[in-house]
Image: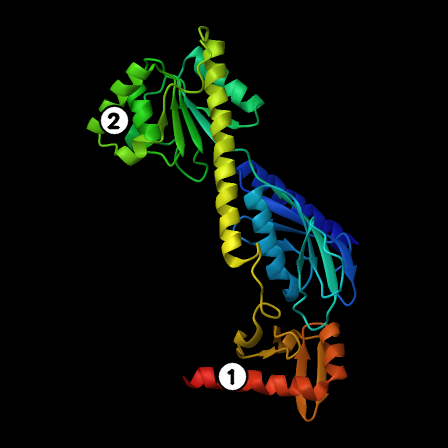
Amino acid sequence: MAEHLSVTADLLQLEQRLIASGAPFAVVTVIRAAPPTSTQVGAQALVEGDGTLHGWIGGGCARAIVIEAARAAMRSGLPRRVRISNELAAPDPDVDVHAMPCASNGALELFIQPTVPAPLVVVYGATPAAREACVLARRMGLRASLAAEGARHDANADVDVAGPLAPLLVLIATQGEGDEDALEAALRSPARAVLLIASRRKADRLRETMRMRGIGEARLAALQAPAGPAIHAHTPQEIALGAVAGLVALRHEFEECDAREGGAEAGASGEAVPPLPPCEIGMEATHAAGHYVNPVCGMSVEKATAKHVIDYAGQRVYFCCDCCKTEFERAPERYMAIAAGLHTHHSESEGS
């Protein structure tokens, strides 16, 4: 119990750090575990955007499937249920079903809740419209950051829009104070779109200035001016409102575009999560010194720490869990033949 609480506390601390850094992640919770399994209902894990898994939701048979499903959930921003089982059941459109690759043949059902940080928006300018736009953008669920007020924006020292927290969108609300430098800095950043509060005539003049400063046409295509829809704004508050409407519209356009691209990639492979060989590694498992390939599920087991061992026909066989050991005992000759094949495969690989 104390160990469970410690793991939960560690995951919560990691969640807070990822939220603070603006990194995506997904929390995976076991909601059903049919024996034989190495986990239990309520067990949790956290998957980072790069696929790193923290916590425990089952052995190698489930791990790779869960990681890919969690990353798919992060891409879509939507929660999902995943079932890993060979049981016969009626199709459920709300559940992603995958065959259990492990020979132990247990079953798992998991709920995956992604946390995807809101897009980061950097607002340039020391104007009332800039400050108002920053406030409104935050109310709309965007992570808005107001660039240093009164600072001269140096495109060669672009600290506001570069780095690990680079913005998705930039809003230029300088309105005559350092327009060129701020716009160049924004266009040299990785932001997907740059919105400029300016008239069309002024925007065209600034585009020519950007060309003279070496900004290419492909990057100039990211510039949108005027910023947002025409609402006949007059006051700083109204100008900010129109600009933030443009930010919100672009956010949703990008999300829909990314979702379509993600769906196309999934369709190309036939399913969102690709099928996996038994226990991820199967016949490609390495026989490093001090390790043994479990013939039941294909996992590499460290001999010195293995808890499940059988002596059979003069050979010592190592298992990752009691489930695999029990399965071996049902058909030892079959799995000994598999073990011999694994070791033969390894010997041939070493000789090549």
Which residue does the image show at 55% across and 58% down from the upper left? 270
Residue 178 appears in the figure = no
Position in image of residue 323 (x %, y %) = 74, 73
- Quadrant assignment for the C terminus: bottom left
Number of numbered discs overlaid on the protein picture: 2
Which residue does the image show at 57% across and 85% down from the upper left? 341
Which residue reaches farthest bottom?
314
Task: Answer above or below: position of 286 versus 192.
Answer: below
- The residue carrying mark 1 is 345
**Which class describes the residues within 10 Å of circle 1: few (<14), some (14-19), or many (20+)?**
some
Task: Answer above or below: position of 61 versus 78.
Answer: below
Which residue reaches farthest top?
234
Q: Considering the numbered disc 1 on the image, is that residue within a helix, a strand or a loop?
A: helix
Which residue does the image show at 61% across and 84% down from the upper left? 339
From the viewer's side, name the closer residue of 166 and 215. 215
From the viewer's side, name the closer residue of 61 and 315. 61
Task: Answer above or below: position of 232 versus 295.
Answer: above
Mark 2 and mark 1: Cα distance apart in space: 61 Å
From the viewer's side, name the closer residue of 179 and 215. 215
User: Which amino acid type corresponds to the residue marked 1 in the rendered image?
Assistant: His
Position in image of residue 291 (x %, y %) = 58, 77
In the picture, measured across the screen, residue 33 lies left or right of residue 236, that is right
- The residue carrying mark 2 is 210
Which of pointers 2 and 1 lies earlier in the amino acid sequence?
2
Position in image of residue 114 (x %, y %) = 62, 43
